[in-house]
Each structure stands twice: as structure tokens, then as C-alpha cells.
Image: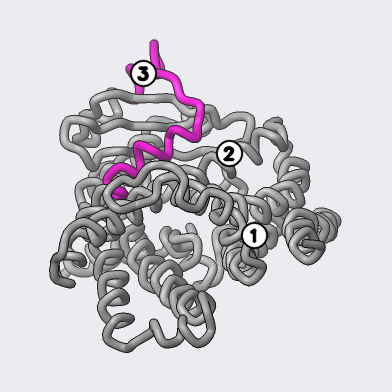
Amino acid sequence: MLAVAAFVLALAVGPFLGLRAYARRVEAMDAPIEDRLHRLNRIQQAVGFGLPALALLGGYAFGLIDRATARVAAAGPDLFGIAVLEFAVIVLVTLGIVAVPLVSMALGTYPTVRSLRETTTSTWRRVSRVVATLTIAVGTAVLGIGGFIALVSTVSVSRLVLVAALGVLVFVSFGLSPYLLVLTRTHDSLEGQRRERVERLCDAAGYSPHRIYLLEGKSTKTATALVAGTLPGLRYVFLTDYLLDECDDDELRAILAHEFGHVAGRHLWQRGMLTVAVFGAWALVAQQAGFSRLAATFGVVGYFVPLIGIYVLYRVFLLGGLARWQEFRADTYAASTAGREAMVDALETLADANDVRLEAGLLYSLATHHPPIGDRIEALRDDEQSVRSAASD
């Protein structure tokens, strides 16, 4: 019991102490703000990925989930072959194990971020947003996993049908993700002259959203836009008030056109197809290769470690590579719709408004699913030169 308490305490306090010390050192550096923020972002990317995996391994090693489910064994109703109460306990304990180090990380780094960027949002609000985003991510995963387990438990089907069912669940979760994401943000209907401005720019970019919402971004100095357009007839535009203030009409139209480019290119569905391909293949290969023997020999670690390896390959290299390519494609779409110079100006404005470095390493851009803004500007310039060369020939 003492070991379990020590493990939970380490998850809660360790990331905070380590990252708070690192953040203070970064804050004291004699370097541009965007460079110092980049350092913090890099460590948060690494810690935010590695700590939850280690926390889950530790949770299984100390039997936290087994201890929790033992208290509700054989209790509660069954639904499609799933013990509802036991499944709910597993989800809640898993969410807690993952959330504790992430919250600890946010508490350790955000005071420095707030100081460097001179933002006004509270640490509590930042932490609550982290928890809300994580809850939605876990919730969508739970729906997929629960649906898959229910199908396997109630119907005898082939492996191909199971992979197809997994595909349906993944596509549903990807299709709903933009709509669920905005639930973590405070949003209001855009009214008055600002609404007329955005509607006019949307029309100029060839896109007619069902509704436009304004996100609060001034307190965090977040200039961003999001288009939820995977469901026909339910296409929404979300953009921050900070973005409206920082961009002129040409720049804002280019940013909106970039987001519309993701919808026109079916980029969200492409990510869904990749996800189905990777994890469908994993499910088939794991069964054929007999990974169950590893689990029988090494316990949950024998299955969890290979799965984490597959997830790293998928999340960073495969999905990250696809996302990079999609960003360049969306930039090209925006340049053809709103003008190349307007798109370049918009990228420079976004970099200034969000205190983002123009340059970043390849691994970092793969992990964040966004190429450096400098590379995006260079790609637009190269495209322009290619067009001019072709025209002169």
C-alpha cells in the first residue's frame, strides 16, 4: 500500500517539480521569447507523451486497475456482453492515471508561459482545459473500444468484418472530433460587424458555413481558426477574437481558406483511413504472430510495450508525416484561393501573434503535426517560382 501511495505521489509531484525548475531556468535565459517558448514546447511534447505511458505501465504493475475493479466485480448490469460498472471503473482509473502527470506538467510550465507571453488566463483555467481535452479524447476512445468489445462479445464474425467494424468506429470518432473539440472552449455566436466581416471573407473563399462561432483567445493570446465540416449541412467556423484583432481582411481570408482546404481535401478522412490501416493491421498481425504469448509470459507489459511502439510509429511518423503533407496542401489551396502573398503574410502574422518560431526541427514538427512556419513560407515561395518558370517556358 505504501508503494502505491509513493507511486501516485511521484506522478502528482515529480513532473511539477522537475518542469517547474526547468521552466524557471528557461525563463531566465537571455533569448527571444519565441525561442524560450519553443524549448518549453519541446519538453512538454516529450514529457506529455512519455509520462502517460509510464504512468499506465506503473498503474498495471501496482495493480491499481485490478484493485479498483475487484471492488465492483459481478456488480452492476451487463450491456452487450460488457460489465458496465467494471468498464466504467477501468475508464475512470485509466483517465486518472493519465491525467495526474499531465496536470502536474501544466502546473509546472504554465506560470512561465504566462509570464513570457503576458497572458491573463488563470492556471486553474489552463488545467481545466487540459482535463477537458483529455476527457474528450478518452471518451471517444472509450466509445470505439466499447463498441468493438460489444461487437466481438455478441456476434461471431470474421476478422475482416471486425477490422471493417473498427474502421466504422474510427471514422465516426474522427468525424465527430472537431465538434467535440470545441466543447472544451467557451464559444459564442459571432454577431454584428464582425460577423458580416467573416461571412464576407468566407464567401470570397468559396465556403458557406452553417454557423460562425467566436472563441475566447485574448486571455491566452491564441490566434487560431477551426472549421468543423465533416458532416454535410453541419459546417461551422470557429475562430478566436484574438485572431480577428491581429489579422487584416486579406490575411484572415487566407487563414479561412487554409481551413477550408482541409475540408475540400478530405484530410480528416485520410487520417481516419490511416488509423484504420495501422491498427487494423496491428490487430491481425498481433493475432497471427502470437503476441498473446508475450502477454502470458510478461503480463500486460508483454502486450502494452509493443502496442506503445506501434502507437509511436503511427502518432509521430505516419500520422505526423501525413499531417505535414496536408498542411502544405492546405497552404497551396489557400494560396490559389486568397493569393500567395496573402497566405505568406497570414503565416507571418500567426507566428508573431502566437510567439511561434519560424524554424523547428523535423521530429518536433512531426510530433506537433505542423511543419515550421518558415518551411511553409519557403514552400509557397518555391511554388511561386515554379509557376513563373513554367510560364516563362
- Residue beneath label 3, please? 195
Q: Quadrant of the N terminus?
A: bottom right
- Membership of 187 in magenta stretch: yes
Task: Calculate the distance from the C-alpha at mark 3 to the C-alpha at mark 2.
Answer: 26 Å
Query: Which residue is at 49% across, 35% downward?
Result: 184
Q: Secondary structure at mark 1?
A: helix
Q: Nearer the viewer, residue 383 or 333?
A: 333
Q: Of the residues tagged 1 and 3, which is closer to the observer?
A: 1
In the picture provided, is 82 more to the left or to the right than 93?
A: left
Give the image quarter of residue 179.
top left
Q: Secondary structure at mark 2?
A: helix
Residue count near mark 3 (Cα–Cα under 10 Å), binned few <14, some 14–19, many ≥20: some
Magenta: predominant secondary structure element? helix
Q: Nearer the viewer, residue 339 or 280?
A: 280
Instruction: Give the answer, above or below, for where 190 lies relative to 260.
Output: above
Dot 2 or dot 1: first in sequence order is: 1
Contact, CB < 8 Å: mark 3 with mark 2? no
Q: Quadrant of the C terminus?
A: bottom left
Residue type, numbered disc 2 = Arg
Q: Of the residues tagged 2 and 1, which is closer to the observer?
A: 2
Give the image quarter of residue 101.
bottom right
Residue count near mark 2 (Cα–Cα under 10 Å), binned few <14, some 14–19, many ≥20: some
Query: Which residue is at 61% across, 50% downward?
Result: 96
Q: Where is residue 53 drawn, in percent x and y?
A: 57, 67
- Residue beneath label 2, please? 129
Task: Calculate the distance from the C-alpha at mark 1 to the C-alpha at mark 3.
Answer: 36 Å
Magenta residues?
Answer: 173-198
- Residue beneath label 1, please? 44
Dot 1 or dot 3: first in sequence order is: 1
Q: Of the residues tagged 3 and 2, which is closer to the observer?
A: 2
Q: Going by the picture, which residue comes out furthest to the front?
A: 74
